[in-house]
């Protein structure tokens, strides 16, 4: 009776499995996923809103618009009328700022006017408390 060294021939011990069989594990996981899907309650995708009932009220009056034009030489025009001094412009802007419902001020500079003339008008309006001011005619600067 000789003893064999090495792994050959007839050995009475079974070979050790080195790979794990994944099929039963995957089957169990699929069954668990199906069970979770079945047991999840149905979600309602709705939100309860308390919406107002009755007619809506549109704005009663159109906003008052004041047009301020700054001409190519820096001349300021208030609704088409020339404003000769900065003091008169600021007096008119302070009247606008004092109103409880301020009118809209549309500032329309000429394409070739110096920036400092337009900036002075905007600075005066801001300093005096005019809150509704907007630039109009900006498409002329897209060239």
Image: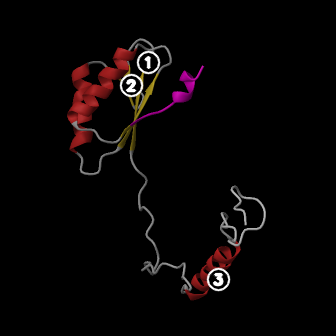
Image location of residue 114, percent across then percent down: 41, 13
Q: Earlier in the sequence, mark 1 or mark 3?
A: 3
> Marks 1 and 3: which is nearer the front?
3
**Dot 3 corresponds to which residue?**
31
- Contact? badges 1 and 2 (CB < 8 Å): yes
Residue at x-position 34% and y-position 45%:
103
Q: Taking 102 as reference, is 21 left or right?
A: right
Q: Quadrant of the C terminus?
A: top right
Q: Nearer the viewer, mark 2 or mark 3?
A: 3
Q: Which residue is mark 1?
A: 71
Q: Which residue corresponds to the image point at 50% horizontal and 18% vertical from the top-left?
A: 111
Look at the image and give the residue range highlighted in magenta.
Answer: 134-143
Q: Is residue 6 above or below residue 84?
A: below
Residue 98: x, y in percent?
A: 21, 43
- Nearer to us in this view, 98 or 123: 123
Q: Report if residue 54 lies within the magenta region.
A: no
Taking the view exactly as shown, the residue that stands out farthest to the right is 9
Q: Disc 2 designates what residue?
A: 77
Q: Residues within 10 Å of mark 3 (few under 14, many from 20)?
A: few
Residue neighbourhood size for the residue with mark 2, other residues' Cα within 10 Å, grouped as few (<14), some (14–19), many (≥20): some
Give the secondary structure at mark 2: strand
Using the numbered discs, state the Cα–Cα distance from disc 1 to disc 2 in whole angstroms. Answer: 8 Å
């Amino acid at each position: 009776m000789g003893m064999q060294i090495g792994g050959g021939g007839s050995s009475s011990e079974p070979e050790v499995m080195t790979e794990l069989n994944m099929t039963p594990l995957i089957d169990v996981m699929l069954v668990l996923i199906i069970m979770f899907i079945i047991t999840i309650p149905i979600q309602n995708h709705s939100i309860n809103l308390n919406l107002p009932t009755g007619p809506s009220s549109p704005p009663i009056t159109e906003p008052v618009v004041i047009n301020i034009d700054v001409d190519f030489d820096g001349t300021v025009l208030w609704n088409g009328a020339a404003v000769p001094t900065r003091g008169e412009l600021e007096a008119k802007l302070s009247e606008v700022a004092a109103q409880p419902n301020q009118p809209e001020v549309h500032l329309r500079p000429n394409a070739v006017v110096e920036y400092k003339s337009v900036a002075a008008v905007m600075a005066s309006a801001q300093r005096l408390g005019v809150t509704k001011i907007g630039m109009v005619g900006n498409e002329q600067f897209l060239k």
